[in-house]
Image (cartoon, helix red, strand yellow):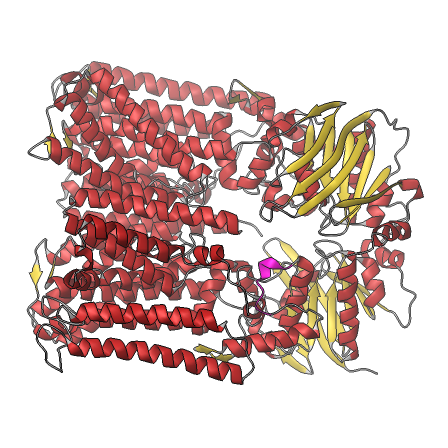
Amino acid sequence: MKNANVAEVLKKNAMLIVLVLVYIYFTARTGGQMFQPLNFNALITQNAYVYILATGMLVCMLTGGNIDLSCGSFVCFMGAVGGIMMVVKGWNPIVSILLMLVVGIVYGCLLGFLIAYVNVPPWIATLAGYLAFRGWGTKLLSANSTTGSIAPLPDSFLNTFSGKVFSTGVGKMNIPCLVAGIVACVIVFVASIMSRANKVKKGYEADSLLTVLARSVIASAAIMLFAYKLGLAGGIPTALIWVVVIVLIYSFVTSKTIMGRYFYTIGGNAEATRLSGIDTKMIMFVAYLNMAVLTVITSYVVMARFQSANSTAGTNYEMDAIAACVVGGVSAYGGSGKVLGMVIGATLIGVINLGMSLTGVDANWQKVVKGIVLLAAVVFDIVASKKNATR
Amino acid sequence: MAKVLLEMKNITKTFPGVKALDNVNFQVEEGEIHALVGENGAGKSTLMNVLSGIYPYGTYEGDIIYNGEVCQFQTIKDSEKKGIVIIHQELALVPQMSIGENMFLGNERGKKNAINWNETYKEADKYLKMVGLSESSHVLIKDIGTGKQQLVEIAKALAKNAKLLILDEPTSSLNETDSRALLDLMLEFKKQGMTMIIITHKLNEVVYVADKITVVRDGATIETLDKHTTEIDEARIIKGMVGREITDRFPKRENVAIGDINMEVDNWTVYHPLYTERKVVDNVSLNVRKGEVVGIYGLMGAGRTELAMSIFGRSYGSEIQGTLRIGGKEVTLKNPREAINAKIAYVTEDRKGNGLVLSNPIRVNTSLANLSGVSSRGIIDMDKEYQVAVEYKEKLKTKTPSVEQNVGNLSGGNQQKVLLAKWMFTDPDVLILDEPTRGIDVGAKYEIYCIINDLVSMGKSVIMISSELPEVIGMSDRIYIMNEGKFMGEMKASEATQENIMACIIQSGKGE
Amino acid sequence: MKGIKLTDVLKKYTMVIALILVLIFFYITTGGKILYAQNINNLISQNAYVFVLAAGMLLCILTGGNIDLACGSVVCFAGGLGAVMLDRDMNVWFAVIAMLVCGTIIGIWQGFWIAYFKVPPFIATLSGMYAFRGLSNVLLQGYTVGIRNTTFLNVFGGGADCYIPDFMGSANFNTTCMVIGIGIAAIYVIVVLRNRISAKANGYEVEALPSVIVKSVIICAVVIWLFYKLANYKGIPTSLIWIALVLLVYSYITTKTTMGRYLYAVGGNEKATVLSGIDSRKVYFFAYINMGLMAGLGGILTVARATQAQPTFGQGYEMDAIAACFIGGASAYGGEGNIFGVIIGAVLMGVINQGMSIMGTDANYQKVVKGLVLLFAIIFDVMSNKKKK
């Protein structure tokens, strides 16, 4: 049995603790508004884009601190493209979704090619996109609409990416939601206990049963809280399902697959990875192709939430995604960082966003705060890893 | 009785968890060449870093007394003002700048805000002549070879009016001729009254130039040998370094049958990746048999690493000509993955730079070249990976509490073992080892030699590239001698001596 | 005497050639308008900020391909600060100094995190980009603040009449301007000659005479032509003076001072520089402080020209500055680049900006074009470095 050192526990879960503290702070400041069901709902739907973009950004950053500055502008551009397809040209939504995906793949391939095979530094390649796609997207929107935004989007599209699953009215408890929550809790418990049992059987180091149980209890409490609140707000938001699916997939990919492993080792030492027989250019290419695809998926969710395509969509999104990763412990130099950390980081960003909105903080101060949070998170990460490093 | 120029008294320096220097006492007399020898990690470089101010006063205990006064250096510049100049192992030169610019970097000519470039180049030329270089000071550093770059470093030190010159492994990247030239330059400086400290692991050089030799082991000074009073030879020095007589530095290899040719290379020519008319490897032919250790000895710049990398999946070179045969069949290997699939492994020369991912654990590094060996359908079996890592840790006797330890925290010898483990896990038939024991202490070296013996006893082939003659002669069955991209000769290890190998190289006519 | 190969000349002056080609392109598509005196004049004053910001950006890029994404927001913030102060009738020079100090302090802030805490520059400055944009809006409360102080406007090139007056009054042609232009060309020739003579006297190496003559002739011709054009339209815009000042100062710093040298050294090989006893952190710090100062000056010039401060100013300025540096030959990996290249790059960006305006291109498409130009400049730089290395 391992002794739990309070200081160690604090250090390891620093960001989680910060999240809880910030949440409590905003709850107090808003007189408990943060705790209302509708705001739980808002937390998810308004920030779904952060989770999805940050997942892609995580993969890029793993390869060596590389980022994608163009994703926000590309969301705007894809919105325009999608709006034109579905509304102006009246194409079938499913066809439009697939075509949008194709456009994203084309961009991803182009970007991946430039970065991986031509060796253009990523921040420059994507800086060009940041500018170009904003202009192109805005132009498309103004050329195809008098108001500068395109609406209304087809219902089938809206229902796939926004709204609620099995929805009921606000105020009444949504049963499917509660059930889903309970199922999730059970899965968490079973998975943790089984994984520990497996480790013990094979003779590896494992946390004490008490620790594992404590962690599962806390996680389950959080899940049930969410389920309860979301239930009162009318049911599981569709966006949440997309976020959960994507987060789970990438959590698996980064920790258990060969491709995922390679992202980490390239960030750790690209040349050693190459000489170990791995096609590093291909991996970089995949990282950016992946980012583009996730950006397209983000644009679906964003369009559905705004119920239109407009030119302000995507503004500052890249900032939020990078901040979510950095706050979540992803190294700005590459080679380390986990999906779970990113989720905590994204949630923190979401809580700050929501909290500032509810307390009526000026949008401009919100910008200032976010800029400082990003800086502070990086500094903290750097200082903390300096202490961990040995000679 | 010559005057004592430098005295370091009771120097103790600790890093978190490690006492690098323990009450060290060290004296240097004016006008002498004093060698510091010791195994890796013994504390030689740390001692010199304390002296030069890289570890400032206050971060160590004890006193530095130079020219009779106690010194409290805070920065490199403080020690340089007194005339103490250190030349590091990694050359402190900026490749895109010219010799002249580099020479006075940090020591500019003219005023602080108005550099006088004309004077800079003129003075640079003066110092270049003093070290025997005929290049113009306008030439860019990246356009001259390592040997000349090392001389530029010395010229740089002269421009700082060095009175006590410290050279840290000055010949580690030089070939035999350039090394000899540098040592002779040192003797010349000694005649002019310069005092020098040289840190080197090349014991033959120590015997050639040093007046006194101080042996450092485990952060303490063990003994100081004086050429004028004691008979000094390499064996005597080693005894001081290791604390025991090493008669058998190389484990015996017995009863290993040498079989058919495993890999064969014919008329292999490789052109430089940028200067595409330059041949880096010129018409080389070699072969290696099962159960055989073939050594490739050569001077720096001979092209051995380039040869190895070009064979290993064309990792180097703009154009490659020639045939490569494995098991008798001709193959073309277009990238490292194809080479690995053809059962060739290449253990790189620079384990930290391009061999290992230092920030990742041993387990991850061990499986990196063969992740499919611990995975199914793209998904890694973590248990299996762990087991494999533990298996190799035990087989190679890697000293570490757990395979989850980050490789960056291991000592050089253990890092090299992890690197070897990675390649052994790809189950190769041919292993190319590039300087496998560089920067490793004598004890760990022995263990690696044993591993090599085990490999060939299983019928594998080992090509060992090395610049240490004793190692090449002691471990190989056959030796190829390479110089300036060409193979100069081949001989059985049993017939090889240091003299006739050197003769083979010199006989090429140029010898550079 | 060294032989001159055509291909070597081409490689060294690629960007100048590109500039000439782009000029020809816009000459054709604008029916020659791009070279009208008025447009050349506008090119200089509208793009003054590019020259100023790019000079600061060059220092950062030299240290290793590091950039400052915040400079546009800082331009807006510093400019806004000055406008607000002038609006409250504070002393004009006090306001000017405040703007410069503001920019410098921000440079110190960012430089501190980058140099001493090793925060990756693009993250530190990305943070600044957002934070200072937000602060600009807070400062200006979303309003446009007009500037009426005529001293300020006259000195810093705002509005329509900020030119060096013609002391030798002739109608439609600013003789003073022409005379100054000829004077500059003459001074240049004299300086070059003097340096050559004294160098020869001291026994130093000198460049081959033919190439010196060719270069001098070309430079004098360009200068005289430029001032001739300016003389045809109101004369020397005051912003040109500030541009010239900045370029001269930074040209000197990067070639003649030890700190300038260290910028190149750190970008070329940081480890080597540290081992030569130089504190690389001070070098990074220096670069970012200068960038901040230049952003402050950029703020002054921007609000002076527009005679007002708006919360939307400065957007995309960092792009222009970065593009100008890279087009001018700075290396994305550091250690290479110079002020002459920055001039060429900034002029090229200015020509593109001006040309597209004259052609009436949609503002959104201008963004697309600029993004692509930046991309191509980098691709070209990366590919030509691959061959050089």
Residue at the image position 72 percent from the left and 75 percent from the top: B7
Which image quadrant: the N terminus of chain B?
A: bottom right
Vertical placement of A379 versus B139: above or below?
above
Of residue A24 and residue B75, the one placed in the foreground of this image is: B75
Q: Position of residue C316 (x, y in %)?
A: 24, 51
Q: Position of residue C74 (x, y in %)?
A: 24, 59
Q: Is residue B85 visible?
A: no
Vertical placement of B431 versus C254: above or below?
above
Q: Is residue A376 magenta?
A: no
Vertical placement of B483 versus A342: above or below?
below
Q: Position of residue C361 (x, y in %)?
A: 16, 45
Residue at the image position 79 percent from the left and 72 percent from the top: B187
Q: Is residue A337 left or right of C141 when viewed as pictured?
A: right
Of residue A97 and residue B284, the one placed in the foreground of this image is: B284
Residue at the image position 52 percent from the left and 77 percent from the top: B118
Where is residue C103, by image quadrant?
Answer: bottom left
Q: Is residue B160 visible?
A: yes
Vertical placement of B158 versus A294: above or below?
below
Q: Position of residue B285 (x, y in %)?
A: 78, 36
Of residue A189 and residue C322, the one placed in the foreground of this image is: C322
Where is residue B128, by image quadrant?
Answer: bottom right
Q: Is residue B139 magenta?
A: yes
Magenta-tinted stretch:
B137-144
